[in-house]
Image (tube, rainbow, N blue to C red):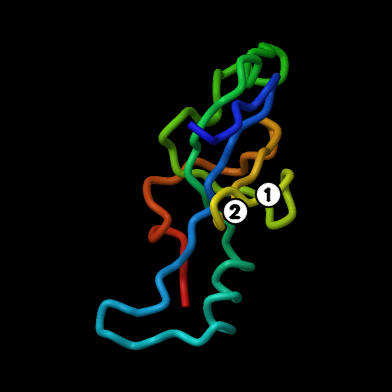
Amino acid sequence: ERLPSPTGWRILILPYRTKNVTESGIILADETLNQAQVSTQVGYVLKVGPLAYKDPEKFPDGAWCEEKNWVMFARYAGSRFNIDGGEVRILNDDEILARIGSPEDVLHF
């Protein structure tokens, strides 16, 4: 597996990429796709570091997310890098804004 394992309190996220064609077959312009990406940053939690959410003072109710969850995060949060042509991010555990059921729940055009 080529994905890095996050250390400490960090989380490895795979950002969601919207489809460029709607269900009815309309091809979306790059500008429209970029606006959707800018307005809503969501991603899939790939890996969670060993110390993420372990601080009981900072996270008294437990973890905000876990592996295989969809989450929202700020546009510029975390460190970005590419693996096999796709972007992944490493965020700190407290940079997660919300847990969501599906990316389509929050994306809009």
User: From the viewer's perspective, is residue 75 above or below residue 28?
Assistant: above
- Say which amino acid is labelled 1: Phe
User: From the viewer's perspective, is residue 105 above or below residue 20?
Assistant: above
Q: How crowded is mark 1: few (under 14 residues within 10 Å), some or many (20 or more)?
A: few
Question: Where is residue 57 shown, x and y percent of the image?
Answer: 72, 14
Corner quadrant of residue 12: top right
Q: Dot 2 lies on which element?
A: strand
Mark 1–mark 2 distance (CA, rounded to whole Å): 6 Å
Q: Name the residue under label 2.
A: 87
Left or right, residue 106 beside residue 91: left
Q: Which residue is drawn at 56% across and 57% down?
A: 85
Q: Residue at x 74, y 54 (%)?
A: 76
Q: Are marks 1 and 2 in contact (CB under 8 Å)?
A: yes
Left or right, residue 19 beside residue 2: left
Question: Where is residue 68 shown, x and y percent of the image?
Answer: 41, 35
User: From the viewer's perspective, is residue 91 above or below residue 88?
Assistant: above
Q: Name the residue under label 1.
A: 81
> Mark 1 or 2 closer to N-term?
1
Number of disc labels: 2
Q: Residue at x 69, y 39 (%)?
A: 95
- Say which amino acid is labelled 2: Glu
Q: Which residue is drawn at 34% across and 88% down?
A: 26
Question: Where is residue 104 shown, x and y percent of the image?
Answer: 39, 61
Corner quadrant of residue 90: top right
User: From the viewer's perspective, is residue 5 above or below residue 77?
Assistant: above
Question: Where is residue 75 shown, x and y percent of the image?
Answer: 69, 57
